[in-house]
Amino acid sequence: MQQFMILPAADVPKESEWLRQQSCPVIVYGENDAMANADVIVDDRKAAEVLAKRIQTAPLTAMTLVQVLRSTEQLPPELGLDVESLAYSTLQAGNEFSSWLKTHESITLAEQSGPVILLERKGSEIEALLNRSELRNSITVEMRDAWVEMLELLELDQSITRLTIRGQGPCFSTGGELAEFGSAPDPATAHWVRSIRSPARMMQKLRDRITCHVHGACIGSGIELPAFASRVVAHRKTYFQLPELSLGLIPGAGGTVSIANRIGRQRTAWLVLSGRRITAQKALEWGLVDDILD
C-alpha cells in the first residue's frame, strides 16, 4: 500500500481528474499552476518529509482524510457532513483508532453539576456561555445535547436576531471529551446519532445569526463548531489545533466542512496531518477567524 506521494510542484500533473485517482495523500512542495492537484502544500522537501512521517503513524486515517476533503469540496455542506460522518464511523471500527483506545481506556470523566450552557437574553439577542470550565468545556455528550437544545431555541424563536457563544474559564473548548471516545454502542449507531442530533448541522443551518468569541485552546471540535458561525472573533492569545490523526480519526464535528470552507481543503489537511497549532494571527490571515480582540 502506497502511504503517501511527495512531488515537487514542477512535477505535478495538470489533468483536472488526476488527484481524484490517487488513493493516498499527495504532498506537494513549491509552487506552480497545478496546485489544485495537491492534498497539502508545503514550502520544501524537508517539510514534506515531516508530514510523511506523521502519515506513516496512521496511513489509513490520512488516506481517509484527504478522500473526504476532496469530496466535501464538491458537495453542499449537508451532504459533506454525511460523508464526514460515514468516514468517521469507518475509522472508529479500524485498527488505528482501536490501538489508541486501548492505551486510553483508564480515562474517567468527573461528575459535574449546574447548567452545561448558561443562556441570557438581552432584547433580541442571546448570550451563551459554555459552563464546564473544569473540563475545559470539552464536548461531552451532555455538552453536545445542550448545544443542540440551544440551537433549537434559536431555530424556533425567530425574534432572536443574534446568538453569541463564548466559553467560561481558561479556554473556549478543548474539543471532544476523550473519556467518552469509543462509548457508542457501535459505529453505525454513532453515525445515526450524528445524523439526527448534530450541533454541526444546526450551526450550518443557522450560521447567519451566530457569532462565536473564542479564547485559549480551541482544539478539535472546539474550532470545528465555531467555524460554522458567520463571525468568529478570537482573543489574541488563542491557538487552534486539529490533533485527530494521532487518535486514528479525522475531524468528526463538521470540521472537514466548516474549516475547509473557511481556509480550503489543503490547509485543513495540513492542520490534521501535521497536528501543529496555529496562532490567532495565522488563523486571521487564513480566514479561520474574522477578527482578533484583546
Image: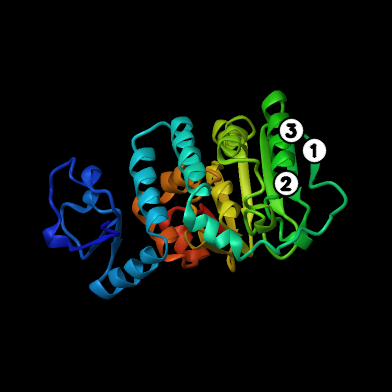
Measuring 23% from the left and 48% from the top, which residue is drawn there?
22
* Pointer 3 or 2: first along the chain: 3
Local SS, label 2: helix
Residue denoted by label 3: 124
Residue denoted by label 2: 143
* Pointer 2 or 1: first along the chain: 1
Distance, label 3 to label 2, CA atoms, is 24 Å
Residue denoted by label 1: 121
Q: Where, by quadrant of the figure, is residue 185 drawn?
A: top right
Q: Determine contact: label 2, label 1, CB under 8 Å.
A: no
Image quarter in which the N terminus is found: bottom left
Measuring 39% from the left and 67% from the top, which residue is drawn there?
54
The amino acid type found where label 3 is placed reads: Ser
Q: Nearer the viewer, residue 136 or 153?
A: 136
The amino acid type found where label 1 is placed reads: Arg
In the rendered image, the vertical position of residue 124 relative to residue 57, given as above or below:
above
Q: Nearer the viewer, residue 39 or 35?
A: 39
The percent position of residue 44, horizontal first and vertical second, equals: 24, 71
Measuring 48% from the left and 57% from the top, which residue is drawn there?
96
Local SS, label 1: strand
The amino acid type found where label 2 is placed reads: Met
Tell me: 32 left or right of 44.
left
The percent position of residue 287, horizontal first and vertical second, equals: 44, 53
